[in-house]
Structure formats: structure tokens, C-alpha cells
Amino acid sequence: MKLWDLYEKSAVDLGSFLPDSTASFETYCLLEQIFGWNRHQLLLHKDMEVNEEQIQKMDTLLQRRKEGYPLQYLLGTWEFWNYEFAVGEGVLIPRGDTETLCEAVLDAAKGFTAPVIADLCSGSGCLPVVFSKEIPNAPRIYAVELSEEALPYLRKNVEKNNCTNITIIHGDVLTWTPNEPLHIISSNPPYLSAEEMLELQKEVTYEPKMALEAPENGLYFYRMLSQRYLDFLVNNGVLAFEVGYRQAKEVAALMEVAGFVDIRIIPDLCGIDRVVLGRKP
Ligand SMILES: C[S@@+](CC[C@H](N)C(=O)[O-])C[C@H]1O[C@@H](n2cnc3c(N)ncnc32)[C@H](O)[C@@H]1O
């Protein structure tokens, strides 16, 4: 069988499970993984004969994918803000939605000459790594994560992206006390309600529950973190949250009660309210 035939057969196979354009994209991703070539290189080799082992490998990946296992876990890496992150079972896959939070923090950082930043609930490290790369005047960035399973990915991603100004804290954001004042705090905490957990897309059920679910109808971390971290910010310091699609107004109210001012809600590219940001007076 030629490489092109393997592509066509696999895309049809995945097409029974996914929309055609997605099936084609994912087939390329899986072939890239097996052959170690990018899409352009695959096309250059489309008439190459593939061997039995390669066909078998592709079959196994397709089978897993059709069971709903996330593509990103099969690939072992995923891109966020044009940087590559190691991912796998035990860590949340970085989402495009989270780039809105990233953008808000990069924007807020322009207001400080040497911002000390903390990212609470860091998971794969997608946010602190981007901050480290894109905010060169940030002397220190703290990345706080509790999960034993997520931590190896966080360490690996910080290392492989060469982020020497990131300090990883293996700890609970509900009890961690920073040892210096912070200029910016970002957090994409768990925010799904128990009800939403029952309606998860199949792929998401493979992701860690600890990264997804929060008590108080998903609002628990927003309430706790707004209260706890106000004191750890400098005056005019910024707290920025990613929020679920129906939570922005409630989170803004929780931040106001905690003492934050200038609270703003920022929509993502789909127009969904995605980030809530406030300042310490
Ligand atoms: C929604 S995920 C976000 C991960 C990452 N920031 C991102 O945007 O992809 C929430 C993360 O919070 C972590 N987490 C949950 N409870 C925590 C706690 N009490 N202290 C620290 N981290 C916690 C989870 O393990 C998970 O990695």
C-alpha cells in the first residue's frame, strides 16, 4: 500500500466518526506522528510504499481515536500560542479559549516595569511558559499546581521551553502564600458544575476530573482565590480569570465583593465572555 492510500483509507475511516475536514486534519496529525514528517513532507512521499508495521500502528491509533480518546493524548504534544507542550493523561489539554486569558495578561503586563506574576492552577504550564517567553521584563513567574499527575508535564514544558524565570510550586492554591508581592495573578481554575460534568463530550471524560470540576456550581475557586489573593497583590495589581461560558457576571460580582475594582469582562473570538479581570485599589 502507498502512503497516499493509507491516508485516504484512514480519512474515510475517521470520517465515520468526525466531520470530513476534521477527519482529514486528524489523519495528517496521526501520520505525522508515525512517520515523523510534517504534512508537506508526507505529501512529497505520497507514492512511497508503507510497511506492515506502519499500517498496524495507524490502525491502533485510529481505533483509539474512534473510541473518543483525545487526539492530543495520542500525539503527546499540542500547540498553544505557537509553543509546543507535552500532554498526556493526567493533564488538561491547553485550549484555544485560554489564549484570551493569555492576551489579557500580556496586555496587563505592559503597565508594569518588572512584573512578578503568579499563575494559579497551571496544569501543563501553557500560561506561565507563554508569559515567560512574551514578557521578557518579568523577573519571576510562579506556577502553582497541586496534581501529582500534572506536575511532570509542567516540569517538562518549563524545561523544554527553557523558561529559567519560572518557579514551579507543587502546592494548593487555596493555601499557598507567595513570599513577595505580586503584580499580576492569572488563573484558569476548574470551573465545571456537577451538572455539566454529566454532559461532557466523550474526549473530555479522559481528562482529569480535578482539572474540570469545582463545587458551588463551578464558582468555588473564583470566590476563594479572589478573597485570598487580594492581599498578595501590589496596589493596582491585576487578577485575571478564565471563566466558563455562563459565569462572567457571577465571577465579576465575586471579585467586587472581595474588594477588586475596575472589573472588566473580555469576550473570546467567538464572542463568549471568557475572561474577568480586576485591579486591587
Ligand atoms: C482547568 S485546569 C487549567 C490548566 C492550565 N492552566 C490550562 O489553562 O490549560 C485547572 C488545573 O488546576 C489544578 N488544580 C485543581 N485544584 C487545585 C488546587 N487546589 N491547587 C492547585 N491546583 C489545582 C488541576 O490539577 C488543573 O491542572
Image: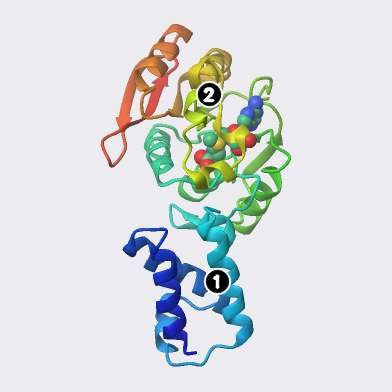
Can see residue 92? yes
Element type where label 1 sits in the image = helix
Spot occupied by residue 14 in the image (x, y as percentages of width and height): 43, 65
Q: Residue at x 49, y 18 (%)?
A: 217
Whether 121 is drawn above or below 81: the answer is above
Closer mark to the observer between disc 1 and disc 2: 2
Nearer to us in this view, 22 or 180? 22
Which amino acid is tagged 2? Ala
Q: Is residue 121 visible?
A: no
Is 181 placed left or right of 104 in the picture? Answer: right
Name the quadrant containing residue 25.
bottom left
Residue 35 horizontal/vertical position (percent): 55, 79
Out of 242 and 63, give the one closest to the viewer.
63
What color scheme is it? Answer: rainbow
Amino acid on which the number 1 mark rests in the picture: Gln
State the image coordinates of residue 88 (x, y, percent, origin top left).
62, 53
Q: Quadrant of residue 246?
A: top left
Query: For the residue labelled by badge 2, is the local secondary structure a helix, a strand or a loop?
Result: helix
Residue located beneath label 2 in the image: 194
Of residues 5 and 217, the one drawn nearer to the viewer in this rendering: 5
Q: Residues within 10 Å of mark 1 (few under 14, many from 20)?
A: some
